[in-house]
Amino acid sequence: MGQGQSQDGDKVSSHQSGTKGGKDRKGKRKLSGKSKERPNNTTGSSPSQSPSVPSSSNSFASHSGDVGNGTTKKSSSSSTSGSSSHAHQSLHNHQHHHHSGSGTRDVPSSRHNHQPHGAPEPATDTSVGAQRGSYSSSGGGERSAPSRQFSLTRQTPSTQSKHAQIEKYFNKYRDSAEDAILAEGMEKFCIDLDVDPTEFIVLVLAWKFEASQMCRFTREEFINGCQKMQAHNSKSLKERFPDLLREAKEKKNFKDLYNFTFSFGLDHSSGQRSLPIDMAMPLWDLVFTQNRPELLESWFKFLKEGGIRGISRDTWNMFLPFVESILPDLSNYDESEAWPSLFDDFVEAAEVERTTL
């Protein structure tokens, strides 16, 4: 604002020096800049002492106030206006900025709104910024907001409406006694998705929802998961299945899914820290749906015949690099490496079985 005022002041001084002492075609002397700065000119002078305003200036006053949906008309004689009218007029003049290179100038808010005879009319700023800063005479100083701004808002779907759709989707399966989807709601959820609860895609969904335990989705887990997958109903969620299956095949993602499966199978309410063997084996079978290791069947046989009752987290996590790096005949297994002791027993049992055949 400081720079804009400095430019206006320079242009007024330039105009004054060019008109002071000069005469128009009728031989009458023009108003000098000095006479404009006469004290109390805006409030104490009588109508007869005020310089007359050309009709073109009155036309500009009516035109420049026409901004937005309302129009602001300037008073034809500032000498008869009171202090409140003068304050409103000064604020209105302050909104119209100088157009660079146009050869026009603003009317300083501290002077009369009267233009010297023959002076060029200030250009009207029709930019969006000027419209946002304009004031309506009918509103008594209220800002008039551009209608275009509201039309853009109506065309953009709000985040709140999307969230409400997911909330509605969750409430469809929500348990009547708890704010979560439990066994009965999970069954209806899978029916609407045309999948079996024991399918691999359901495990992938639980992974994306970051579910804390099996057969249970909290409101937060369900809504956050749907938002990440950009789904708000069964149809839109089913459309994401191919992408989810491809994502789960990637090595880094599969490792995360694999480690998640152990926690997903635990009964946290009872403080369970290891998976019972009758839970661990089905989960291994499920998580390896898309890439089944050759060692898996012999591993299951060893667990059953060895009377293993539970699988620790360390054994579960290390089994993935074990089947990724060890050959099916176990010939490259090294007992000196930091494998769980259960793997040593498995390799030893496999060697005994081969020698007895």
Image (cartoon, grey):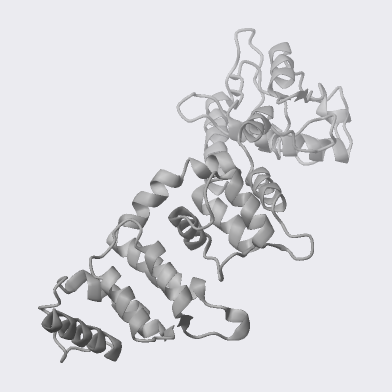
- Quarter of the picture containing the C terminus is bottom left
**How many labels, in total?**
0
Is residue 108 visible to us here?
no
Q: Residue at x 75, y 24 (%)?
A: 69
Q: Residue at x 71, y 26 (%)?
A: 68
Q: Nearer the viewer, residue 231 or 261?
A: 261
Residue extending furthest toward the top: 26
Coordinates of residue 308 in the picture (x, y in percent): 39, 86
Is residue 150 visible to us here?
yes
Q: Is residue 283 left or right of residue 128?
A: left
Q: Nearer the viewer, residue 193 or 97?
A: 193
Q: Residue at x 60, y 58 (%)?
A: 222
Q: Residue at x 50, y 73 (%)?
A: 265
Q: Is residue 92 left or right of residue 351?
A: right
Coordinates of residue 63 in the picture (x, y in percent): 70, 18
The answer to whether residue 290 is above or below residue 10 is: below
Q: Splitting the image into 4 quarters, where does residue 101 fall?
A: top left
The answer to whether residue 329 is above or below residue 247 is: below
The answer to whether residue 27 is above or below residue 177 is: above
Coordinates of residue 142 in the picture (x, y in percent): 79, 38
Q: Splitting the image into 4 quarters, where does residue 296 fall?
A: bottom left
Residue extending furthest toward the front: 357
The answer to whether residue 333 is above or below residue 259 is: below
Q: Nearer the viewer, residue 319 or 122?
A: 319
Q: Nearer the viewer, residue 196 or 325?
A: 196
Q: Is residue 353 left or right of residue 150?
A: left
Coordinates of residue 10 in the picture (x, y in percent): 52, 38
